[in-house]
Image (tube, grey):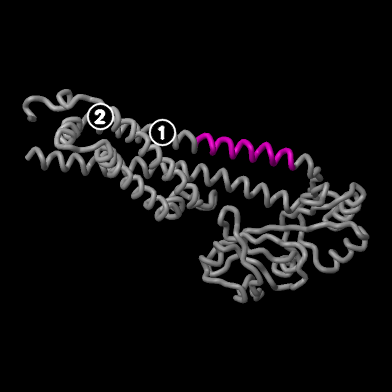
Amino acid sequence: MRSTLRRRSDIVAAVRYILIMYLILFLASYCLSSANNFLLQKKQIEAGRAGFTNEITFYAPLFNKDQIEELHQLLYEEKFSLYARTEEALISNQKLEMVTIQGDDGIYCCAVSQETSNTLGLHKGSFITIRCISIQISDLFDSAIKEKIVKVPYDTMAEIFPSYYKFQQVFIGSNEAVQIFRNYLDKTIGPFGEYEVNSIGQLDKETDLFIAEMVGSRMLVGAICSVIGLLNIGVIITSKTQYRKKDYGIRIALGATQKDIWILLMRNDAIKISLATVAVVISFRAVARMFGIELETAFDTSTVIGLAVTSISFLFLSALIVTKRIIRTKIADMITEDDL
């Protein structure tokens, strides 16, 4: 009867240990992966602004080919990049975000994110239809936060959404070019059109501050979760030593070495941590989707594996310290006369 109760108690304790480690690993992985995603987004933003000194944001219909050609003539050799975005594209009942890419003249070609490709079973050369326009996929790319994105040239976006008002950005160089573009906006969208001019340098400072806050907060929470996990390992292995003190004393009396006790201490807990790690890797996306955070972060497998390796390493070290303490303890102090 006593052995049965003890076995049940051990099973309950094992399940509780795995659940606690699962939660800790999940939260720490989410926070650290989220911090990494913010850094990746920062790189993408800076890459899009590279070579420009000003940004104009405005809400207006998309420019057609003739208007873009007119802008090129007005600005002479001044370089500029137009971008627009929308979340109205419906493909196979999937809500996708569409953004423009600058440069390719191949109208009706697009690039899709790996997340879009995996969800819809698309590949290079596949065709998708957006508002009755068939577009061929020319490239696949990795999105920083695994968004379902379709990137199309600006002129293709204008063909898909003619006369639609969209939030747009233009990155441009000199202040003279900014004034020319503002005059053109006044002429095309009217004097009451809303637009805003920002310095790329100021935007970079604001972006750096925002990214620093986001990354710092997530790194802090991730670090706290990691420390809690390590403390949990240390507390459990210490309490288990006290709980099984008599067992270890009997084993030492029967000839168990320090290595035998060390393996006995850390073996089961190492297996539990490994099981919790596998559970996090398998279930992360499903759990993130359940709580509506799947678009906030791209799960980084290396992060959870790194946390698991750190936890197991700490377990090995803790078990070694506790083992040395057990070996130094007199057997008589571990085993009562009734147990002999």
Residue under label 1: 228
Secondary structure that dominates the magenta span = helix
Residue at 39% x, 37% y: name it. 314
339 drawn magenta:
no
Total marks placed: 2
Q: Position of residue 237 (x, y in %)?
A: 30, 34
Amino acid at pointer 1: Ile
Q: Which residues are magenta?
A: 204-221
**Marked residue nearer the N-terminal end (1 or 2):** 1
| Discs 1, 2 touching: Cβ within 8 Å | no
Q: CA distance from mark 1 to mark 2?
A: 25 Å
Residue 110: x and y, percent? 67, 69
Q: Nearer the viewer, residue 145 or 249?
A: 249
* Residue 155 placement, left or right of 122: right
- Residue 207 lies in magenta, yes or no? yes
Quarter of the image for residue 214 reads: top right
Residue 326 got which mark? 2
Look at 57% across and 46% down and name the residue there.
Answer: 36
Label 1 Cα neighbours within 10 Å, binned few <14 / some 14-19 / many ≥20: some
Q: Residues within 10 Å of mark 2 (few under 14, many from 20)?
A: many
For the C terminus, the image quarter is top left
The image's mark for residue 166 is none
Q: Secondary structure at mark 1?
A: helix
| Rendered image quadrant of residue 254 | top left
6 or 164, which lies in front?
6
Image quarter in which the N terminus is found = top left
